[in-house]
Image (spheres, grey):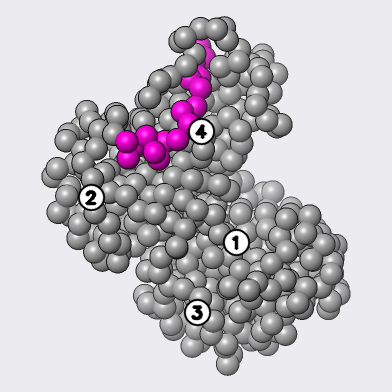
């Protein structure tokens, strides 16, 4: 039996916002924590990504700040959310912003990889809620652009991932800068790697709510292990799995391989974007926006997308390269079957990877019988479902855009888009450096997102550049992935259709 947000004490100003978004009943983590968090208690919430944690802390934050009234002074925010990655910070802000607006509250994000000047300007105007990554926030604190002495509510989200990335010393310094009398909420899948020390040090008589842990399984998630005979067979199976009409994420071990596979899929008529540490923040944002939109249904990513990236209705996750360890498998897989939706997870395994993959799945408590497949196997076709229409790559124009930057690719106008909305242009990554694995969770951090002890004074002032704009074509006519819709070509051409 589900419980409505109104029954849990969420104010009508916020339930109205939720209803407009189609949200009326609470998920377990929300149902368990909201009575305590709305009352101002410190809470330790244990649950993996996709369980609804963001709304669990966003609702009490907006409600309590709204009820208390007041206005943030310049440089003195009233609430703080700490997140381990830029993508997660952006998505948290997207959840909080409409709730905050219901009370006339303002929000902003603070993280590295983008211009610091804009963040300074927002802080000078005064902002109620800051969603931040630790590195850039510490920089702004040291430069006296922001003080945390007025923070009434502090949230640590995915604290275990912050520990994995080495952020805990910075998190500790930030928490020490917030008033002890404020409410604090900590959400984490595990309490290892020093997270338990944060709980003991900063949470006052906390109420613990454990809905699930990182090893618990989502009932709506189905796991598959596909054994392939070799590299050619693997390539064909992966392309087949990418060819369906729904959204899917394909995970690779290295940045170079992610970029390469996205290019190969594009050339095969499957609109795809990549996400990895070699992209600027602007490029990452644009690629995620394209993946969330109607035109690009495939995201090829490294483990940088394994945590903190939420896109609705991802129906399939494919481990093209099996991850290095079982935690990464669980976090990658958690991009599907989120918020009550169903999803499938496929691991594609070469002969030399079978033993290692068996051990990895055992550690992850995943029990699944491997199946030997080819691209034409019924098991593969069942997961593909309806095959999407072939989309011919547009003519690609490449020209230099300045020293130290890459080139920009542009496609012709997109005609006959199947749904509302237009996609903005996507900057082309700069010259590819020699690729390397991105670590346990694939987090390639900018200077301002690394722990302060890892950074020099010179790289603290670095900021990301916006992607260059291509002159000539109007904004809506430019496409960084070099695709034109199949509708813009002859509709009766057999070349515009792809068979199984």
| Left or right, 28 with reference to 346 | right
Query: In the rendering, at what x and y percent does residue 439 appear?
Result: 32, 54
Local packing at callout 1 (Cα closer than 10 Å; few below 14, some 14-19, many 20+) is: many
Query: In the rendering, at what x and y percent does residue 147 appear?
Result: 68, 70
Q: Is residue 489 magenta?
A: no
Chain-order first, disc 1 or disc 3:
1
The residue located at (37%, 34%) in the rendering is 381
Q: Quadrant of the C terminus?
A: top left
Disc 2 target residue: 370
Local packing at callout 2 (Cα closer than 10 Å; few below 14, some 14-19, many 20+) is: some
Mark-to-mark CA distance, 3 and 2: 32 Å
- Which of the 4 image quadrants contains residue 339? bottom right
Mark-to-mark CA distance, 1 and 4: 35 Å
Query: In the rendering, at what x and y percent does residue 337 appear?
Result: 49, 55
Query: In the rendering, at what x and y percent does residue 47 appear?
Result: 49, 71
Residue range highlighted in magenta? 378-402
Disc 1 target residue: 132
| Left or right, 1 with reference to 275 | right
Q: Main secondary structure of the magenta part?
A: loop
Disc 3 target residue: 210
Q: Nearer the viewer, residue 9 or 44?
A: 9
Disc 4 target residue: 245
- Residue 277's place in the image compared with 156, above or below, is above
Q: Is residue 432 visible?
A: no
Q: Nearer the viewer, mark 3 or mark 2?
A: 2
Q: Are marks 2 and 4 in contact (CB under 8 Å)?
A: no
Chain-order first, disc 2 or disc 4:
4
């Amino acid at each position: 039996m589900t419980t409505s947000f109104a029954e849990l004490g969420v104010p009508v100003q916020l339930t109205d916002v939720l209803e407009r978004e189609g949200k009326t009943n609470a998920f377990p983590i929300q149902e368990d924590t909201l009575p305590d968090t709305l009352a101002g208690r410190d809470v330790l919430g244990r649950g993996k990504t996709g369980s609804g944690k963001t709304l669990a802390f966003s609702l009490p934050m907006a409600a309590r700040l709204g009820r208390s009234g007041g206005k943030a002074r310049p440089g003195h925010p009233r609430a703080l959310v700490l997140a381990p990655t830029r993508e997660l910070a952006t998505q948290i802000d997207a959840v909080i912003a409409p709730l905050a607006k219901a009370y006339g509250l303002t929000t902003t994000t603070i993280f590295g990889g983008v211009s610091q000047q804009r963040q300074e300007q927002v802080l000078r105007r005064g902002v109620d809620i800051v969603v931040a990554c630790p590195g850039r926030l510490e920089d702004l604190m040291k430069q006296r652009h922001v003080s945390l002495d007025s923070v009434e509510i502090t949230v640590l989200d995915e604290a275990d991932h912050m520990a994995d990335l080495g952020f805990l010393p910075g998190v500790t310094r930030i928490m020490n800068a917030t008033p002890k009398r404020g409410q604090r909420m900590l959400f984490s899948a595990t309490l290892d790697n020093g997270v338990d020390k944060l709980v003991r040090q900063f949470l006052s008589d906390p109420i613990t709510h454990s809905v699930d842990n990182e090893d618990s399984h989502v009932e709506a998630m189905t796991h598959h292990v596909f054994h392939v005979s070799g590299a050619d067979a693997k390539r064909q199976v992966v392309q087949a799995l990418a060819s369906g009409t729904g959204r899917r994420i394909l995970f690779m071990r290295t940045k170079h391989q992610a970029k390469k596979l996205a290019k190969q899929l594009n050339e095969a008529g499957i609109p795809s974007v990549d996400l990895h540490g070699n992209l600027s923040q602007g490029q990452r944002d644009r690629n995620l926006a394209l993946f969330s939109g109607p035109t690009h249904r495939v995201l090829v990513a490294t483990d940088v997308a394994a945590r903190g990236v939420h896109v609705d209705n991802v129906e399939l996750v494919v481990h093209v390269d099996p991850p290095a360890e079982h935690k990464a498998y669980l976090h990658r897989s958690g991009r599907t079957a989120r918020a009550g939706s169903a999803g499938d997870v496929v691991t594609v395994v070469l002969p030399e990877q079978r033993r290692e993959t068996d051990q990895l799945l055992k550690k992850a408590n995943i029990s699944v019988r491997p199946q030997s497949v080819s691209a034409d196997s019924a098991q593969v076709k069942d997961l593909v479902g309806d095959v999407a229409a072939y989309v011919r790559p547009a003519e690609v124009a490449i020209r230099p855009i300045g020293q130290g930057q890459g080139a920009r690719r542009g496609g012709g106008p997109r005609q006959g888009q199947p749904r509302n909305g237009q996609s903005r242009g996507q900057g082309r990554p700069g010259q590819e450096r020699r690729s390397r694995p991105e670590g346990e969770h694939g987090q390639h951090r900018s200077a301002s997102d690394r722990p302060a002890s890892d950074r020099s004074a010179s790289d603290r002032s670095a900021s990301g550049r916006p992607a260059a704009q291509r002159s000539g074509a109007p904004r809506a006519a430019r496409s960084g992935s070099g695709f034109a819709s199949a509708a813009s070509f002859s509709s009766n051409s057999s070349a515009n259709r792809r068979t199984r």
